Image (cartoon, rainbow, N blue to C red):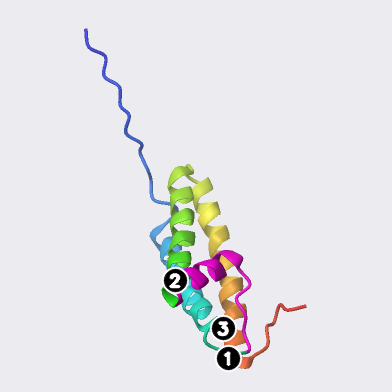
Amino acid sequence: MTVERSHTLELDPPGTVGLRAAFFVLWGIDMVAATLFFLVPYATELNPVTVLFYELLGLPGVAVAAICYAAIVVAIGHLLSDPIDRRFVGGMVAVYLVLVTNNVILLLSGNSPIAA
């Protein structure tokens, strides 16, 4: 008698297609804004990991850091079960919405709306 064991890890995509698309659109805008922070004199990137990657690799390091963040979010979303994965990705969309809004306003006006 042979016993078969399945060691495959079944990963389900995190959230709905629309939710994932919203995450990646906001993530992309945030990545561009973070890159621009290193090019304009009046904005400063506060994330120490992004700064470290920038110091190591230059502007491509900013993209590498952003890709790492997205990979972590997607991996966590894949590991979580439904509906928790939708809540998690939805929460990340909300976080990126705040970050993107702040970053774009900062780049356009020179003033951060959430700065103390």
Q: CA distance from mark 2 to mark 3?
A: 24 Å
Q: Quadrant of the C terminus?
A: bottom right
69 and 55: which one is in front?
A: 55
Q: Amino acid at mark 2?
A: Leu
Q: Secondary structure at mark 3?
A: helix
Q: Amino acid at mark 3?
A: Val
Residue 43 is inside the magenta segment: yes
Q: CA distance from mark 1 to mark 2?
A: 26 Å
Q: CA distance from mark 1 to mark 3?
A: 6 Å
Left/right placement of residue 49 relative to residue 21 reads right
**Numbered tag placed on residue 108 in the rendering:** 1
**Residue 24 in the image: x percent, y percent?**
43, 67
**Numbered tag placed on residue 87 in the rendering:** none
Outermost left residue: 1
Q: Is residue 23 visible?
A: no
Outermost right residue: 116
Contact check, label 1 and label 3, Cβ < 8 Å:
yes
Examine the rendered structure and indicate whether residue 97 appears above or below residue 112. above
Crowding around mark 2 (Cα neighbors within 10 Å: few <14, some 14 to 19, many 20+) is: few
Q: Amino acid at mark 1?
A: Leu
Please report the residue visible at 41 percent of the width from the left and 73 percent of the height from the top.
60
Residue denoted by label 3: 104
Crowding around mark 1 (Cα neighbors within 10 Å: few <14, some 14 to 19, many 20+) is: few
**Numbered tag placed on residue 57 in the rendering:** 2
Q: Secondary structure at mark 2?
A: helix
Please report the residue visible at 36 percent of the width from the left and 36 percent of the height from the top.
9
Q: Is residue 93 visible?
A: yes
82 and 28: which one is in front?
A: 28
Q: Secondary structure at mark 1?
A: helix
Crowding around mark 3 (Cα neighbors within 10 Å: few <14, some 14 to 19, many 20+) is: some
Q: What residue span does the magenta drawing correspond to? A: 42-58
